[in-house]
Image (spheres, rainbow, N blue to C red):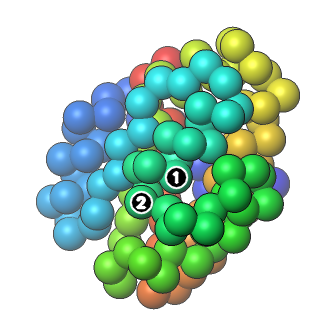
Amino acid sequence: MRQMLHYVPDAARAVEQARARGALAHLLGPVTSKAEALDAIGSALDFPAWYGRNLDALHDCLADLSWQPIGEHVLIWTGHRQLETADPTGYRAILEVLDATSNVNPQRPLSILLAGT
């Protein structure tokens, strides 16, 4: 794994820093199941209606982001440890997709920040 995921202590500060450099910040709150995480990521990034709410569709959407404005995007996930506790396997699977798709689109680079503990 390339490890493009970054841990930050404070989500509000991460949003502020992203916006200060002109990036679009997308906030994802705590979830406790893989299905909730897939829905929440889709909502945070305003995925299109065809989004299938599975890991393959998550990968496809994150690698594309063509419906989003050109420029840097930052997905900030608060409370990510709640999913890790509730569903360690689902958590790892989602992190693998997030890691594999961060910064693959040169027109819409995506950074993933895992906020808090």
List x then y, in percent, for residue 11. 32, 34
Towards the viewer: 112 or 68: 68
Relative vertical location of residue 69 with respect to residue 16 in this rendering, above or below: below
Amino acid at circle 1:
Gly
Is residue 48 found left or right of 25 in the rendered image?
A: right
Amino acid at circle 2:
Asp
Q: Can residue 82 be seen in this view?
A: yes
Relative vertical location of residue 23 with respect to residue 105 in this rendering, above or below: above
Residue 72, picture quadrant: bottom left
- Please give the name of the residue rendered at 52% of the width and 47% of the height, measured from the top-left corner: 41
Q: Is residue 2 visible?
A: no
Q: In what element is the residue under mark 2?
A: loop
Q: How far apart are marks 2 and 1 (CA)?
A: 6 Å
Give the numbered dot on residue 81.
none
Is residue 6 found left or right of 45 in the rendered image?
A: right
Count neighbours of disc 2 (C-alpha within 10 A) and say few if under 14, some if 14 to 19, many if 20 or more: some
Towards the viewer: 10 or 34: 34
Q: In what element is the residue under mark 1?
A: helix
- Please give the name of the residue rendered at 56% of the width and 42% of the height, measured from the top-left corner: 39
Quadrant placement of the N terminus: bottom right
Q: Are marks 2 and 1 in contact (CB under 8 Å)?
A: yes
- Please give the name of the residue rendered at 43% of the width and 58% of the height, measured from the top-left corner: 45
Residue farthest toward the top in the current orientation of the protein: 85
- Please give the name of the residue rendered at 79% of the width and 60% of the height, measured from the top-left corner: 56
| Total numbered circles | 2
Residue 100, picture quadrant: bottom right
Residue ID for mark 1? 42
Count neighbours of disc 1 (C-alpha within 10 A) and say few if under 14, some if 14 to 19, many if 20 or more: many
Give the numbered dot on residue 46.
2
List x then y, in percent, for residue 87. 76, 20
Is residue 67 found left or right of 34 in the rendered image?
A: left
List x then y, in percent, for residue 61. 61, 68
